């Protein structure tokens, strides 16, 4: 698992913030469009209207979802760290028991109470009675980790799909006529004619006229959509890599629960632990990037 293939930049972090801000303020921009229409009507133009589009609702929900990304990752990390400590301790204790006995020692003859994990609380199933039960419990706990990561995969996939609709709704609205009798000004141009209807945006405009500023605004948003699309795909690939890693850990723990000897158990636990550490490295890097 190559962590460098999933590195993120400061520019991408700023793009994420800007895209969240765009999504969270888009509703207020659309609420100003009827004001523009009424302004045009009062000036003697034929009134027009913009058809409602339910895809606009996705903008707000996607913004909220992306705002929660940091807490989502923190929750996954906390859950992963807790179960990772259990895995590593059990692995170390299995090696210690092996050093005192033999790699060929049948697992059924190993006293499960020698493992600290046997004194854990909050069992998913019933309290363990055998060493195999301990491994199975750990297997179930890592299924929880995998499920939490899977939700992250779904999040990025959903945002990716819905962002195309949000983009289409935005572009259609901005290019819409502000009156029925003239092709211009468009909605975007009319919005910039008055300070009270100018969309909130962190752009240093070079144009002094409303049409020029509207063009700069639309171009910047179009660029942002492209940048975020690439970023979201990048985050989606990271989530997929984390999920595949967690799935590999689950698979190794499932195999470990069927181990016949201490030697076989050590092999499975070592493989699971290495894979888990690689996942945590990726998760740590992603969390640090989100905090920047």
Image (tube, rainbow, N blue to C red):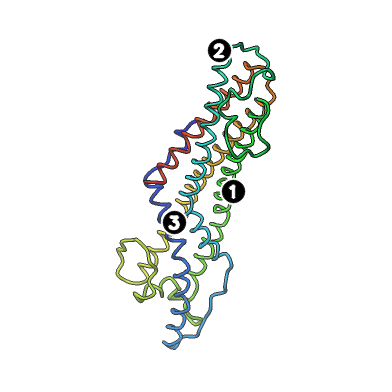
Q: Nearer the viewer, residue 150 or 74?
A: 74
- Foreground tag (1 vs 2): 2
- Above-or-below relation of 63 to 105: below
Q: Nearer the viewer, residue 2 or 164?
A: 2
Above or below 158: residue 30: below
State the mark number for residue 99. 2
Q: Are discs 1 and 3 less than 8 Å apart at CB?
A: no
Q: Position of residue 128 (x, y in %)?
A: 66, 31
Give the Cα separation between the discs numbered 1 and 3: 19 Å
Q: Nearer the viewer, mark 1 or mark 3?
A: 1
Left or right of residue 269: residue 193: left
Residue 273: % across, % down: 54, 27
Where does label 3 land, which residue? Answer: 19
Categorize mark 1 by other alpha carbons within 10 Å: few (<14), some (14-19), many (20+): some
Give the spatial CA distance, label 1 vs label 2: 44 Å
Q: Earlier in the sequence, mark 2 or mark 3?
A: 3
Secondary element at image label 3 = helix
| Numbered badge on residue 154 | 1
Q: Nearer the viewer, residue 82 or 274?
A: 82
Q: Residues within 10 Å of mark 2 (few under 14, many from 20)?
A: few
User: Circle 3: is it few (<14), some (14-19), or many (20+) Cα within 10 Å?
Assistant: many
Asked whether the residues under the numbered discs 2 and 3 touch, taking CB atoms below 8 Å apart as contact, a structural biologist would say no
Closer to the chain start, of discs 1 and 3, is: 3
Where in the figure is residue 183, as x and y percent of width and height? 47, 76
Q: How many marks?
A: 3
Q: Which mark is residue 288?
A: none
């Amino acid at each position: 698992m190559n962590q460098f293939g999933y590195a993120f930049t400061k520019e991408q972090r700023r793009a994420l913030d800007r895209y969240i801000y765009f999504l969270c303020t888009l509703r207020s921009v659309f609420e100003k469009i009827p004001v523009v229409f009424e302004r045009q009507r009062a000036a003697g133009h034929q009134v027009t209207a913009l058809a409602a589009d339910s895809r606009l609702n996705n903008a707000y929900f996607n913004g909220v979802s992306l705002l929660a990304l940091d807490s989502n990752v923190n929750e996954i990390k906390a859950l992963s760290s807790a179960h990772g400590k259990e895995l590593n301790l059990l692995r170390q204790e299995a090696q210690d028991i092996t050093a005192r006995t033999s790699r060929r020692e049948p697992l059924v003859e190993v006293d499960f109470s020698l493992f600290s994990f046997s004194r854990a609380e909050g069992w998913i199933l019933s309290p363990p009675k055998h060493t195999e039960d301990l491994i199975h419990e750990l297997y179930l706990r890592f299924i929880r980790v995998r499920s939490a990561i899977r939700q992250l995969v779904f999040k990025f996939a959903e945002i990716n799909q819905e962002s195309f609709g949000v983009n289409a709704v935005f572009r259609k609205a901005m290019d819409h006529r502000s009156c029925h009798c003239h092709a211009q000004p468009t909605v975007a141009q009319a919005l910039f004619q008055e300070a009270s209807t100018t969309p909130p945006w962190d752009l240093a405009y070079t144009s002094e006229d409303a049409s020029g500023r509207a063009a700069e605004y639309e171009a910047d948003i179009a660029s942002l959509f492209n940048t975020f699309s690439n970023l979201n795909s990048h985050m989606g690939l990271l989530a997929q890599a984390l999920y595949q890693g967690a799935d590999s850990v689950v698979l190794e723990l499932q195999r470990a629960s069927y181990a016949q000897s201490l030697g076989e158990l050590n092999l499975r636990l070592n493989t699971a632990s290495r894979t888990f550490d690689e996942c945590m490295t990726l998760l740590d890097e992603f969390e640090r990037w989100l905090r920047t």
